[in-house]
Amino acid sequence: MKHLISILLVFIAGYSHLYACTVIAIGKKASADGSVIVSHTDAGPDCRLHLVPGQQFKAGEKAPVYWGMVESGRPLGDYGEVIGHIPQVEQTHTYFQTAYPQINSRQLAIGESTLSQRPELMVDRSICEQIMTIEQAQAFALQRCTTAQDALQLITGLLETYGFLPSCVDESESLVIADTEEIWVLEVFSVGNDWKKDSGKPGCIWAAQRVPDDHAMIIPNWSIIKQIDLEDTANFRASSNYMQEAIDRGWYNPASGRPFIWQEAYSPIPREWSTSRFWLFYATFAPNYTEWPDRFTNSVWEGENQYTQYVEPLSIYPFSVKPEKKLSVQDVMAFQRSTFEGTIYDKENAQAWYYPNEEGQLTKSAFATPFPTLEMRRVMNINSRRNVARARGEYGMVAQLRGWLPDEVGGIYWFYVDNAYTSAYVPIYTGATDVAECYKVYNPAYYQENSIRWAVDFVDNLMYLRWQDAHKKVLEKRDPMEARFFAEQADVDAKAQELLTKSPKKAQAYLTQLTIDRMNEVHQLFKELKLDLISEFTNNKQGI
């Protein structure tokens, strides 16, 4: 029995790590500056960032389809095993590649979040004919498309034709596809092992819904599309089998008189790693939308006494909502860094961190962290509920899409590596033609001095020496740097536009050098923080 429990704990720890992708999107009329905003935090192993330049191809050439794009451990530009081919196009766009490619030079951006699906829909790669992963479809869309609707059409066509092959623990996927004008949410479920490419049937089940321009939304690893109105072509799209698969499998009965709810038909019972993020987002940005469950507390004890908490139905969370104030890029960053502070989910406020001092007063340990490790949670009996920020995240971004500016200047790709709570967002203009070398380097097996990922991870580890004090030291240096990036934005925009009118090449060179300089500045900051933290919080000063 003890052995079985140990196996289960390890499984849960590894499985929940995969459900670490939170997507937030904000329509242009809901954002503070009129931009379209889409964000993504990711646990895909390959956090290395590089730019794939646009290319020209000859008529009749084929484009490879890869398996393993999200994995690390290969040379940069090696995307894994070639498992098929599709027709190539004559010209592709420049785009930025990570485990899940996210933005191109034309201000088209895509955020990804893995969803859960019913076991009957899962596929076995060793026997199925499906070959198109969601990350490969994203790459093709960023190479070939300039608008969200074009990307939606291309991606769904590829998945239907070549079959959707899940790459994240056999589960389904969602994408938020955005351009400077609009946002579409795409949800894709697989169709099991029996699908054949020559059957004429779609190789997936999919539905898509447009986000209203004055709305904001979140995808916390769970389906959000509910009722689908295909007569409303301005706001809904779906595969031809979107309802029939549920009918054939006994998951929906048209004779019941009940409406067809996509979310209910294809998703299993919701899990708290998702509902907690649903709750935090909507209770934070639309507190008066409905009477949300009351989970805000600073009590040390409430987080351990959740037996009396109401378990809300998933139906109370809307597809999207009009936020009660217009949201900025900084608001999205702050949410992606959230550790559920001031709620029942706040692991930094667990009772295990408190002890009576000499006067008998309850005192919070300097070791208290919102990211207790698995071993710490076991020893101290702290629950393992998921934060929004992840101690073992890999990378993430906030894409700021500004249609009133030229593409080279209008698109800003705010990118970070490792833990969003600790790391720094660096602005990368879509007119840049390269990124700093330190962002292209990461070997997860061994420390590398020239890797930004290892630099942030080093600081993140040192913070455990005395978290309550160390994290303040990090923020004291990181936050002014990020604030300066925002403060300089208007001047950078103006200079880049001026250069564009004279010489597009000089404008690109300016934006590229600025991007590289800032990325190197972030790297240098974390190298200095490493020395600061070990000097101040070495265990020789801990009273051992």
Image (cartoon, helix red, strand yellow):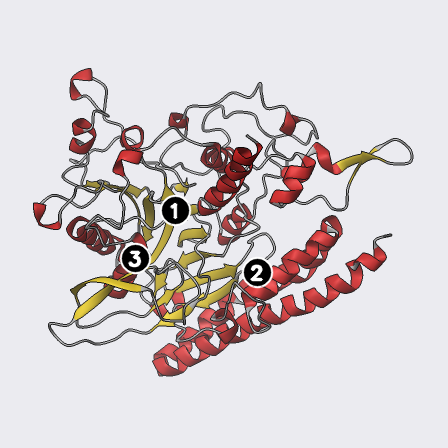
Count up the numbered dots. Answer: 3
Q: What crowding class fits label 3: few (fewer than 14 Cα within 10 Å), some (14-19), or many (20 or more)? A: many
For the residues labelled 2 and 1, the Cα–Cα distance comes to: 22 Å
Dot 3 falls on a residue whose secondary structure is: helix
Residue 146 seen anywhere in this rendered image of the structure: no
Q: What crowding class fits label 2: few (fewer than 14 Cα within 10 Å), some (14-19), or many (20 or more)? A: many
Residue at 16%, 28% in the rendered image: 248
Q: Where is residue 442 in the image (x, y as percent from the top left)?
A: 50, 67
| Residues at marks 3 and 1 touching, judged by CB atoms closer than 8 Å | no
Outermost residue on the right side: it is 359
Residue type, numbered disc 1: Ser
Residue 360 tag number: none
Residue 113 tag number: 1
Residue type, numbered disc 2: Ala
Residue 304 seen anywhere in this rendered image of the structure: yes
Q: Earlier in the sequence, mark 2 or mark 3?
A: 3
Question: 229 above or below 60?
Answer: above
Instruction: Name the residue carrying label 2.
Output: 424
Q: Where is residue 408 in the image (x, y as percent from the top left)?
A: 37, 70
Instruction: Name the residue carrying label 3.
Output: 138
Question: 131 above or below 262?
Answer: below
Outermost residue on the top side: it is 256
